[in-house]
Image: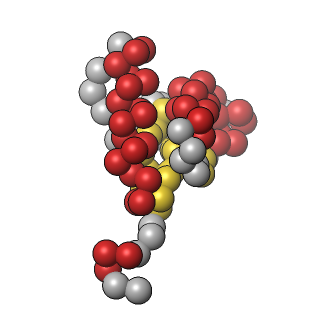
Amino acid sequence: MNKDQEIYPVIVFEGNDWEASMVKSLLENAEIEVFVKDGRMGVLAPWNIAPGGAGAIKIIVSNVDYEKAKEVIDEYRTAEGISGEEE
């Protein structure tokens, strides 16, 4: 497998439990396979979760799906009026 064909995980979103759940759902609806990292922290210690910061819940996709995932997330941010990126 050459470098162009390598598949690796990419963090596409970081946020609190509610936002991460919404983004995960949107990505899955777009037929993008999603992995959630640190999701239990959002349940066990939600006061420790800082969107885009320490303890944030991370949404991870394959590098193959990165561009499509970013489009879905950008549409979500536009619809919600969220400015900037939290990565």
- The residue under the point 69% across, 42% down is 40
Q: Is residue 48 visible?
A: no
Residue 39 on image: x %, y %: 64, 42
Give the side of residue 43 with respect to residue 37, left or right.
right
> Which residue is more in the foreground, 14 or 61?
61
Residue 77, percent from left and from top: 38, 23
Q: Position of residue 30 (x, y in %)?
A: 53, 38
Give the quadrant of residue 79: top left
Farthest bottom residue?
1
The residue nearer to you, when weighing 33 against 50, is: 33
* Residue visible at 29% across and 21% down in the picture: 83
Res 3 seen here: yes
Q: Please, is residue 7 above or below residue 79 in the view?
A: below
* Badge count: 0
Q: Residue at x 38, y 76 (%)?
A: 5
Residue 87's image quarter? top left
